[in-house]
Every structure is written in C-alpha cells, then in structure tokens.
Image (cartoon, rainbow, N blue to C red):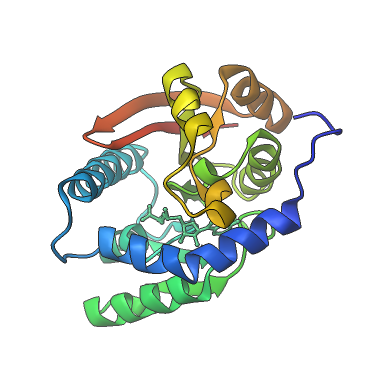
Amino acid sequence: MSSTSSFNAEEHQNMLRSYFNGNGFNRWASIYGNEKLSTVRTTVRQGHAVMMDRAFDWLQRLGLSKNATILDAGCGTGLFSIRLAGNGYNVKAVDIASQMVEKSRDEAIAKGVADRIEFEVNTIESVKGTYDAVVCFDVLIHYPAEGFLQAFKNLSSLTKGPIIFTYAPYNRILAFQHWLGGFFPKKERRTTIQMITDKNMHKAMQETGMVIKNREKISFGFYHTMLMHAEK
Ligand SMILES: C[S@@+](CC[C@H](N)C(=O)[O-])C[C@H]1O[C@@H](n2cnc3c(N)ncnc32)[C@H](O)[C@@H]1O
C-alpha cells in the first residue's frame, strides 16, 4: 500500500468495467443463474450461495429496521439486492458494469421487487449516499491492497452501521498458483483474485476507524472467501 505503488485506480476500473461488460458478464451471469454448469463452476455457485445465506443471516441478526436502506456495492446480477428487497429492505444496487445493472433490473422486475431497489451504474470508489448498512460481495477480491484500501475507505464512509463484505485472505499456496498463471486471458489477468494480507486488512481497519465484529471463512469446492462484518 505504499504511495510508490504502480496501482492506477482509473486503469484498474476500466479493465474491470470492460471485463464485467464482456466475457465476465457471461461467465458470472451463468454462475449466478440456473443453467447447467461444469462441476467446478457448480461448486462456485454453491459456495457463493452458502456465503450469501450466511451474510443474510448476519444481517438479519443485526436487527436493522425493516425500512432500512442497504447499499449493495457491486451488485452483479442482483441476487442479494433482490433478496433484500423481497424481505422488505430498501436497496441501492450499484455496479460498474451497465450490463450487470440491466440484468439486475430485469430480474428485480421479474420478481416484483424493483420498486424497492434504486439502480445505478457507478463504482464502489465513487458511489455516494448514507446507508444503514453496506454489503459488498466478491468485488473487493478483484483489488490489490492499495485499490482495496481506496474502495474500502469510500464504502466505510457511507454508513454508521455494518459493512459486510468478502475478501481473499493471503494464502501462500494460492499466491504460488497465481504466480504460475491465471485462468483469465492475459489482458484480463488482473481481474483474477487479489489477496489481502492480515497486515493490510489491519491497516484498512485502522485508517477507517472500523473494528472487525465477525469473520468466517467460507470454503466450498472451488469457492473460497472470507466473509467479514466490520463496524465503527
Ligand atoms: C464476481 S461479481 C459479484 C456480484 C455480486 N456482488 C454477487 O456476489 O452476486 C463482481 C461484480 O463486481 C462488479 N465490480 C467490479 N469492480 C467494481 C467497482 N469498482 N465498482 C462497482 N462494481 C464493481 C462487477 O461488475 C461484478 O458485477
């Protein structure tokens, strides 16, 4: 996270926007959908569902009022936004990729909950507003430490309540696999998973005045993530 790092936020966002409006859209929309998948991707779908169930359970236990407004930062195809809206919450669903936002809107209309969701094409670094809670699933995993800190600072400034998010904790074996090469095409390689060390997570908490309230590793087949609840 040093200021001499070569991380360029705008360049990184452009790469993510183009990936998630292109190959990434097809890839993730099928994982988050119902179509038949390979065994590997089926475990990713199942693991993601386990993570979402756990996150929803945490949120429910926090006892937010039913009219609470929740920001779903990097909403993807809208799975969590739609679940929140279906349970009476008001939702702001934001994604960098317009294709993802359109898909979320279509799904929300089909499920009859679109009136509870405000959609916006925007980034997790730039979105504004005040929310009772913020959720951000499987988005920060695409950010190296410096970008993670920038995005996390913005998200944590938008709520006095909880922020529930996932990230990829540093793991030496995974680091080696990443070094060997990703399974993304070369020009999109940096959209692959980025790991955050405990030291950098500690720094993010310190600089935002947040405290870790809960943390749980979710591992299912090829889906591995750390689910975290932090609050000021
Ligand atoms: C792997 S998907 C996860 C989607 C959703 N959160 C879920 O768990 O179902 C990652 C999503 O993050 C979005 N994304 C990536 N970088 C972003 C950014 N800087 N701001 C907003 N959305 C972003 C992508 O467009 C994509 O929809």
x and y percent of residue 179 in the render? 53, 30
In this picture, is 73 found above or below 190? below
Give above or below for 52 relative to 88: above
Q: Relative to residue 115, is residue 130 drawn left or right?
A: right
Which residue is found at the position 26% from the left and 45% from the top?
44
Viewer-nearest residue: 110 or 24: 24
Residue at far right of view? 4
Tell whether 81 sits left or right of 178. left
Identify which residue is drawn at 75% across, 43% down: 7
Tell me the quarter of the image containing the C terminus: top right
Q: Is residue 56 visible?
A: yes
Q: Which residue corresponds to the image point at 68% horizontal and 23% vertical from the top-left?
A: 203
Q: Quadrant of the N terminus?
A: top right
- What percent of the width, then of the height, locates residue 58? 32, 37
Task: Answer above or below: position of 194 versus 75.
Answer: above
Q: Is residue 131 visible?
A: no
